[in-house]
Amino acid sequence: MKRQRLRNIVYLGLKELRSLLRDPIMLVLIVYAFSFSIYTAATAMPETLHKAPIAVIDEDRSPLSERIVDALRPPYFMPPTRITPAEMDARMDAGLDTFALYIPANFQRDMLVRRSPAIQLSVDATRMGQAFTGSGYIQTIVLDQVNEFARREHAVSSPPVDLALRARFNPELNKSWFGGVMQIINNITMLSIVLTGAALIREREHGTLEHLLVMPVAPFEIMASKVLAMAAVVLVASAFALNVVVRGLMGVPIEGSLPLFFVGATLHLFATTSLGILLATLARSMPQFGMLLLMVLLPLQMLSGGSTPRESMPEIVRFVMLAAPNTHFVMLSQGILYRGAGLDVVWPQLISLAVIGSILFMISLARFRKTLAATE
């Protein structure tokens, strides 16, 4: 009996894979989500400052002002454009410059005699992604150059304590390393829910679900085949993305054990594919499923800790999100892939994923049986 049930699950799973191969839209979505989507998300992190246009009005023309201008260099800024005060407003109105740095005359002389001269920075705040980040960059650059110049001119000795900054897990503070891995984690959650839910709704709309009801197969076998088939597709695609796109194309180092990560990914897929079945049983059509997906997927990804640290969230939100599988998956993935954590560190997340997945599977199976009973 058990052998027959296993054989039914295998045959039904192969049917799901053949059905997916005949759906070009889903195939394009899978390829895009685990290739171009990862690369573009990693290289276009919103808080990253990259080649921002900047203009400089240098009325001082001193060695110090030249040091400041030379420090504003790519890849954070475009080569500075030297303009006159009369051109500044017109260029910013035309959108040619995001920043305009005004260095007044006698700036170096006033600085050396400690008159506290001021530098004006004009910012086009309509470009929010560059404006807030770039203002901090420019302030740091100017202060560093002024302090270094003052130490040289006044022969000030170095401070007695030298602060050595060492960034673990990402020594270059490269945001694309973070973005690429997190996009894989988010896409695993998204695709697993979409594929399983769409597979069930597609069968209902095409009338093939009724054909299954007259066959000697149980609801458990039908649901298990969809869960296993779609989880296998997402697992293979994520393995390709992690090894070829992230490690190969982008050169992001992976610190921890990939087999341990994929064990956690398998448990996570067990939970999210079950959630996809549950949503599909609640929706009557594909548009309704899409609306439910938006209502569920956006909070899951925004509050799981992948985009915003959980420590910055309200306590009630952190507590509620412990019931979400991708909260534990994000913690597990960051621990393994970023910090090289082992089983002795991530075992609580593995157990949580197994428990949440089992609960979601049982709820989805009960709902699926009820749906099939209403279909008969």
Image: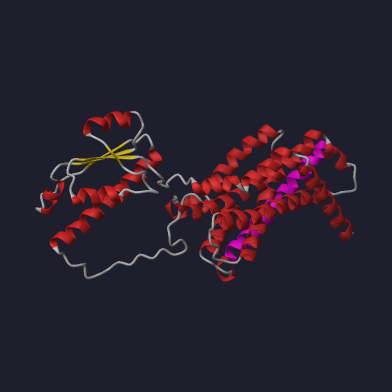
Asked if residue 329 shows in the view, the reply is: no
Image coords of residue 189 (percent x, y) = 62, 49
Residue at 79% across / 42% down in the picture? 19
Q: Left of 319 or right of it: where is 98?
A: left
Q: Is residue 315 magenta?
A: no
On screen, residue 66 above or below 252 = above
Image coords of residue 349 (percent x, y) = 58, 62
In magenta, the rendered stretch is: 347-376
In-front residue for pair 64/352: 64
Asked if residue 287 shows in the view, the reply is: yes
Q: Is residue 370 magenta?
A: yes
Image quadrant where one finds the N terminus: bottom right
On screen, residue 373 above or below 254 = above
Q: Left of 218 or right of it: where is 301?
A: left
Q: Left of 271 or right of it: where is 143?
A: left
Image quadrant where one finds the C terminus: top right
In-front residue for pair 353/44: 44
